[in-house]
Amino acid sequence: GSIDGSIQEVNVSPCPTQPCQLHKGTSYSINVTFASKIESQGSKARVYGEMLHVDIPFPIPEPDGCKSGIQCPIQKGRSYSYLNKLPVKSEYPSIKLIVKWELVDDQDQMLFCWKIPVQITS
């Protein structure tokens, strides 16, 4: 689903094996290296938990990509490292789901989109 960019590497840490074991009350580091195919003044992240083909918004503390390691404005043909945190709240249910992480440009087009299977555990 990445239209305006191409992913070079995705790193979720710590996550030695998939599905990632996400422990409640812990934050996980997200690092995505991607190349932009467009120019954009800014970028915004949207994160979802995907269950039974339904996307449930997953709040993250900093949705602004320009405050998450990306030097804005984004330039065409350049590579960027996007860094963020995925906090797993204690009130989340213990379930298996897919985390879907999107980064959109000024035109609401995808700079990148990736998914990872996770297991939320106590």
Image (cartoon, rainbow, N blue to C red):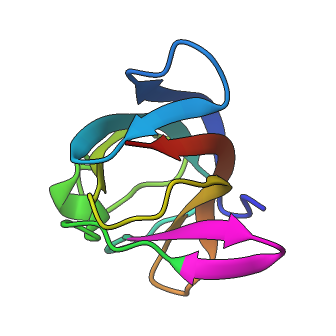
Reply above or below: 114 against 52.
above
State which region is magenta. 45-56
Residue found at x 21% / y 47%: 25
Residue 32 appears anywhere in the view: no
Reply above or below: 102 against 98.
below
| Image quarter (top left, top right, bottom left or bottom right) of the N terminus | bottom right
Residue 14, position as x, y percentages in the image? 38, 21
97 and 46: which one is in front? 97
Q: Main secondary structure of the magenta part?
A: strand
* Left or right: residue 63 compared with residue 38: left
Residue 73, position as x, y percentages in the image? 28, 64
* Left or right: residue 60 compared with residue 10: left
Residue farthest right in this picture: 53
| Image quarter (top left, top right, bottom left or bottom right) of the C terminus | top left
Reply above or below: 102 against 114.
below
97 and 7: which one is in front? 97
Q: Is residue 102 magenta?
A: no
Residue farthest top in this picture: 16
Residue 97, position as x, y percentages in the image? 67, 55
Residue found at x 82% / y 73%: 52
Instruction: Choose top left, top right, bottom left or bottom right for residue 90.
Output: bottom left
Residue found at x 62% / y 59%: 100
Reply above or below: 106 against 100.
below
Residue 69, position as x, y percentages in the image? 22, 44
* Left or right: residue 89 compared with residue 38: left
Q: Is residue 53 magenta?
A: yes
Residue 64 appears anywhere in the view: yes
Residue found at x 27% / y 60%: 89
